[in-house]
Image (tube, rainbow, N blue to C red):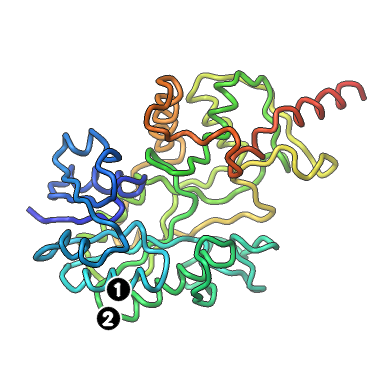
Amino acid sequence: MPRALILGGTGPIGRAAAGRLLADGWRVDVTGRDPRRMPDGLRAAGARFLVADRSDPAQLKGAVRSGADLIVDCLCYTAADARLLLRLAEHATSTVLISSRAVYVDAHGNHANSAIPPRFDGPVRETQPTMTPGDMDHRSPEGYGANKAAAERTALDSGLPVTVIRPGLVHGPGAANPREWVLVKRILDRRATVLLADGGRGVVHTTAAANLAALIATVAERPGTRILNCADPDAPSALEISRTVAGHLGHSWREVLLDATAPEWLGRTPWDAPHPVVLDMSAAHDLGYRPAGSYARTVAAELDWLLRAARTGDPAGILPAADDPSFAPFLDYAAEDAYLAGSARS
């Protein structure tokens, strides 16, 4: 029975990868700092939890033990992280480093976190230029993609069979910042209206953790040094996402599709983009990858996960706080009501 070791196995990618590999007959160990975050379903399916801090070389060495057929690193953010991963990859048949579409730049050097949004000529291939590798704070807007690029370069230059996977906006159970919460929360609050900036036309390619897991399973059977995009087979707009979420939760609301005359900050969603950001999946398909499902099919697991948490009082603390700066601007009901009242009077 082949063995897989997943670093950071309790997040959305690690959970999905572990579940897929277990179903495929692998023996799976996942690492993390807190055993309480290990999903009961994975434990029941046979996955083992190993306490190991991603930044602790000794703990990671103990986790890899005599070797693994596959190592999946969901927590590689910097070149230093990549160098630590390579110490483990020397004892693995195949290694996967989860990177991000945030490394890509357009013809003017703009990227996912720059002040000016990127404008790509079409679907982004793996050959698209990337940010210059850097080592500034990887939690900053400029530092995230630059550090990911540095991690990629370090891993790929090693000569080891490391596959770099660049996903889009990841969704799935276990997400630390579940973007769909901005719609689920609105539905739980029984909002009768949803406002969408730019008519809800924004497209930033989504990536189901389940589809990442399917690509990881493909790579596991075909070790090599390469870069692969990973995104859902469809690229839904913000409007389509809002309809998918509302439909799954059985909610109806009035759609207010805003135009350029509306306040700039009104009706924003996590999927806004003045120009589409779509990932080309040709390379993955050429390798034999087959997706687990569309956005609508795969996002259901995350939506049900969020709904269970809300209905049970969120004992695990997975839901964003009301004042979370990553979500609060999308849920400014007072501003929305004021705008709607003003529009009704006019």
**Along the polypeptide, which appears first: circle 2 or circle 1?**
2
**Which residue position is annotated with label 2?**
159
Q: Is residue 120 above or below residue 199?
A: below
SS for dot 2: loop
Residue 32, x across and y down, in percent: 28, 50
Left or right of 99 on screen, residue 87? left
SS for dot 1: loop
Q: Is residue 57 above or below residue 213?
A: below
Q: Is residue 75 above or below residue 340?
A: below
Q: Is residue 3 above or below residue 330?
A: below
Q: Residue at x 76, y 37 (%)?
A: 258
Q: Amino acid at mark 2?
A: Gly
Q: Amino acid at mark 1?
A: Thr
Residue 151, x across and y down, in percent: 40, 71
- Among the 4 quarters of the image, the one containing residue 332: top right
Q: Residue at x 20, y 61 (%)?
A: 70
Left or right of 337 on screen, residue 1? left
Residue ranking furthest to the left: 1
